[in-house]
Each structure stands twice: as structure tokens, then as C-alpha cells.
Image (cartoon, grey):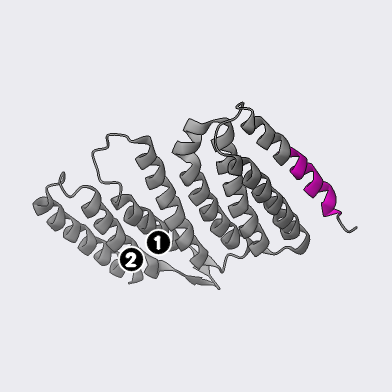
Amino acid sequence: MQRDYRTIFGVLLIAGGLLMALQQLGYLGGQWGDALFAGIWALGALYFFDRSRSENNPWFGFIALILGGLAASNLLDLFIAPIGEALGGAIFLGAIGAAFVLVYRREPNNWWALIPAGVMFSLASISLLNDLRLDLPFDTGGLLFIGIGLTFLLISRLRSAGEGLGWAVFPAIALLLFGLFVAFDAALPWNYVWPALLILAGAFSLLQAMRKN
């Protein structure tokens, strides 16, 4: 049965109009554009979500999650402005990450989608920590490389087309080490850390060789 999207469109227009009215009357925070675009993004999210289910196309779900993240961010700005300021960016970036995870979940051979997902989740964490203005003992910039490194570590445990993706452990180690260097450059005694890391890497290589034999 063909869906009549005019019903959804009409309901969201009414909801958007009510939100704009409440915002103009001072009952909600944010700008009038937050109310307008919250309705537009929500309409788009519902439309593409429905298309994703009816046509089993992961890219429609991808778009739906991104638009849903935009709608959620705008709604937070309207209803709870302080939380919206702290979480809005993280929610949007997290929604993009979840969209890439959906692409992988629909087709496990699309393991590559986990890489941008890891990037987006890492950026979401950095955005959240920076917006919360916490006094942290490390540089949040290092979290980007640590997050991507953990993503590659996860990929190294997966299989695609019947073959393992163990090669991903090497960029994982490099990224994790670089992320730790960026995050804790001023705090860690690197004169001792680097030798220890080399010993651990050598031990890992020996163990791999012994397992193959």
C-alpha cells in the first residue's frame, strides 16, 4: 500500500508552527530557525527512515540518522538550551557515526564504514569534553587518534569475504601510540615508555610467529 506522506508532512508543519509560536512567545529558548529546521530535519528523517525500511537500502537509513541527529540538536536548543550547547555538536557527530555503523550492519563486507564511524565517534567525544570545559590531565586532540586506533583494532578482529582483517592491527598500534603521545606528551616519561613499547611490539611479533608454527 502506497503511503500518503501528506499526513506526516501536515503533522510536522503543525508541530513546527507550534514550536515557532512558543519560541516567539518566550516559552522556548533558541532562535526561530531552530523550530523551523527541527521540523524540516524531522520530516526528512521520517521520510528516509520509511524508504530505508520499504526498500531495504542502508543509504536511506544513513541519511535518516544524520537528519535525525540535526533534529535532536535543534530540539535541545529549543527546550534545554544549556544542554543543547553542550551536547548539540556531539549528538550530530554521533549520529553520523551511527549512520556509518548502520551501513556496516546491513552489509558486513562494508567493514570500511567502521573507519569513518570511529572518526565521528572520536570527534563527538572531543566535542563533548571541550564543550563541558572540564579540567582534564590530557590533550583531547589525542583522543582522535586513539579512537581511530581502537577502530582499527576492532576491524582486525573481523572477517570479510571469508578472510581475516588481521593487517588492521598494525595501523591500530601506530595510531594508538601516536594518540598517547599527543594526549600525554607533557605527562608521560617517554624515555621509559618507548623502550617498553618496543619490547611489547617485539613480544607480540614473536608470539604471532610461534602461533603460525
The stretch in magenta equals: 4-15
Secondary element at image label 2: helix
Instruction: Examine the image and state in which quarter residue 168 appears.
Output: bottom left
Amino acid on which disc 2 is placed:
Pro
Residue 27 seen in this snapshot: yes
- The residue labelled by disc 2 is 171
**Please, what secondary structure does the residue beneath circle 1 have?**
helix
Q: Total label count?
A: 2
Residue in view at x 63 percent, y 61 percent = 106
Give how far apart the Cα atoms at labels 2 and 1 are: 7 Å
- In the displayed image of the protein, which residue is found farthest to the right? 1
Q: Which residue lies furthest to the top in this view?
A: 27
Q: Quadrant of residue 125?
A: top left
Residue 98 on the magenta segment: no
Could you say where residue 47 lies in the image, as x and y percent from the top left? 73, 55
How packed mark 2 is, by other alpha carbons closer than 10 Å (few <14, some 14-19, many 20 or more), is: some
In the rendered image, the residue lying farthest to the front is: 24
Evaluate if marks 2 and 1 touch, with contact meaning CB atoms under 8 Å apart.
yes
- Location of mark 1 (residue): 152
14 within the magenta span:
yes
Q: Earlier in the sequence, mark 2 or mark 1?
A: 1
- Residue at the extreme left: 191
